[in-house]
Amino acid sequence: MALANCKRCGKLFNRMHLEICAECNKEDDEKFFLIRDYLKDNRRATIYEVSDGTGVEVSMIIRFIREGRITPIDNPNLAYPCDNCGTAIQHDRYCKPCKDKLQKGLSSTREELRQSGDKSARTDYFHKRER
Ligand SMILES: [Zn+2]
Ligand SMILES: [Zn+2]
């Protein structure tokens, strides 16, 4: 027995391998089946249409897609906004350009730091020489 608080409702439950209790998990499953059935009939639906059609919150639909429970392969319009710029994406947190930018951003910051470090060292050197 490993007791834990449900990540969703906060209730104490016997944690087996899930982060949420059986009740929340059942609720998740029911919502998941609702969405899946809706998507079968509405292949071109957007997450907002799915939300309207099933009553499931948009955030939960996005979570299902991110978790890979819903694969948008057959549903070309099933996309959600990139966390950074809002472009429609179908997997991960960021769109491709943002991912590239973020990666480059990280390395260019490092590069700038390294260069400014070099420069100050160099000025220091020249100051000493002038004196
Ligand atoms: Zn729960
Ligand atoms: Zn983006």
Image (cartoon, rainbow, N blue to C red):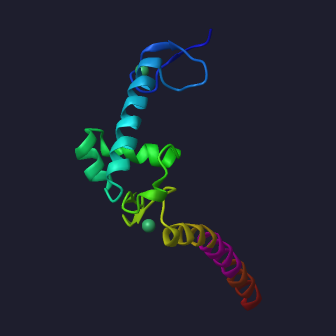
Residue that appears at 48% across and 66% down: 95
**Is 47 situated left or right of 25 in this image?**
left
Q: Position of residue 61 (x, y in %)?
A: 38, 44
Query: Considering only vertical position in the picture, is 122 above or below 97?
Result: below
Q: Quadrant of the C terminus?
A: bottom right
Along the line of sight, which residue is nearer the eye, 119 or 66?
66
Q: Residue 59 appears in which quarter of the rendering? A: top left
Is the magenta region chiefly helix, strand or loop? helix
* Residue 89 among magenta residues: no
List x then y, in percent, for residue 76: 41, 63
In magenta segment, residue 110: yes
Q: Is residue 97 left or right of residue 16?
A: left
Quarter placement of the N terminus: top right
> Left of 43 or right of it: where is 95?
right
Up/down of 20 relative to 2, above or below: below
Whole-percent x, y for residue 106 in the image:
59, 67
- Residue at x-position 65% and y-position 75%: 111
Image height of 72 relative to 27, above or below? below
Q: Could you tell me residue 23's position as x and y percent?
A: 41, 18
Q: Viewer-proximal residue, 85 or 79?
A: 79
* The residue stretch that appears in magenta: 108-119
Q: As drawn, which residue projects farthest toward the top?
A: 1
Query: In terms of image quarters, where does ligand 1 lie?
Result: top left
Q: Residue at x 57, y 17 (%)?
A: 15
Question: Residue placed farthest to the left in the image?
Answer: 52
